[in-house]
Image (cartoon, rainbow, N blue to C red):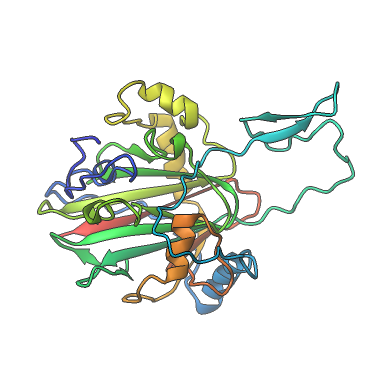
Amino acid sequence: MKSRFSPFNLVLIVAVMSGAQLFARAQAASPTPSPTPSVSPADDEGQENTRGAFLTSRPKTVEKPKSTTTTAPPPHRSRRRPAVATNSSTSGTTATSGTSVAGTSGANSDPAKKKPVQQKMGLGMTLFMRDANGLAVRVEPTHEFHKGDRVRVLLETNADGHLYIFNTTDDGPPVMIYPDAQLDEAGNYLQAHVPLEIPSSVATEENLRWFRFDEHQGVERLYFVFTREPLAGAPIEDDLIKYCGGDQTNCAWHPSTEMWARLQKELSTSTSFAKTVTEGKAQTGTEHDAATRGIGLARDDPEPSLVMMTAATNKGLLVTSIDLFHR
């Protein structure tokens, strides 16, 4: 845990993404407006099309695990890239590789087999706030937060890919807060419509399950970067662990000036969005199980509060951001 990122007194452990990393101490000075992405007109039809494109990529049904009477914690899941199987040219065995390369096929693959049609990249986001009864209820990102408020973010992608999260405090320097060398084996690979919650609602202690605002006011800006392939130059998995060395707790990786400029430029590109007013609604058991047990969401399951999608199918990168105001 990085002590210099402790604004909301998130005494998080390795089992939970460091909230001290995520929410750096806010300063009193007012930041410049967020470089929000260029979005398509927010007409009802446009939002419905965006929402429909995202939700219809969910499977119609999802096999749910059988309920049990045990209280055992969810099994550990790695978010490393899946191994790529290739047929050996000298034997009938199958080799695996830890590196995923787009467009690579086995030696005996069928050249006539068509590649799957790529869809627009989409990211769904829902912000939850702890209510007086300890329940997670949906809240708008534009909500004005105060000392003692606690929040959690649920993220869902419409395709397999890599998720990166960067944080700036009052326009300060960016720091990568996910992937994290202490979590998920330093991986950041997400499967389509299998949500990720940050921090985890199944942490061992109640105070480790939320980001908590303290008395320091300011604006925390979170940048979400969703890519089809790993972001060039950003360490993940073994590279990130090697970068952090023996001090994974206090390890902070900062993007180069050139990389950050590219991401900022991508942030300004055209993006369609859809917003659903769901403030005050409690998180469902389906959402909770999907996030904590690695279960995909089906079409009829609750939809994200906010959906963002690239304007073109040939885009391999989606960048968006939200501001959390602490007054």
Residue 171 image point, x, y percent: 25, 44
Q: Residue at x 44, y 35 (%)?
A: 186
Q: Residue at x 33, y 75 (%)?
A: 279
Residue 177 image point, x, y percent: 35, 40
**Residue 206: quarter of image:** bottom left
Q: Residue at x 86, y 46 (%)?
A: 113
Q: Residue at x 57, y 38 (%)?
A: 81
As drawn, the residue found furthest toward the bottom would be 44
- As drawn, is 241 to the left or to the right of 23? right
Quadrant location of the C terminus? bottom left
Q: State how many labels appear.
A: 0
Quadrant location of the N terminus? top left
Residue 60 image point, x, y percent: 65, 70
Q: As rendered, which of 257 and 27 lies closer to the eye?
A: 27
Is 9 drawn above or below residue 143 in the view shown? above
Q: As rendered, which of 302 and 229 lies closer to the eye?
A: 302
**Residue 119: quarter of image:** bottom right
- As drawn, is 75 to the left or to the right of 96? left
Is 151 drawn above or below residue 223 in the view shown? below
Q: Is residue 69 visible?
A: yes
- As drawn, is 274 to the left or to the right of 85? left
- As drawn, is 42 to the left or to the right of 53? left
Q: Is residue 141 visible?
A: no
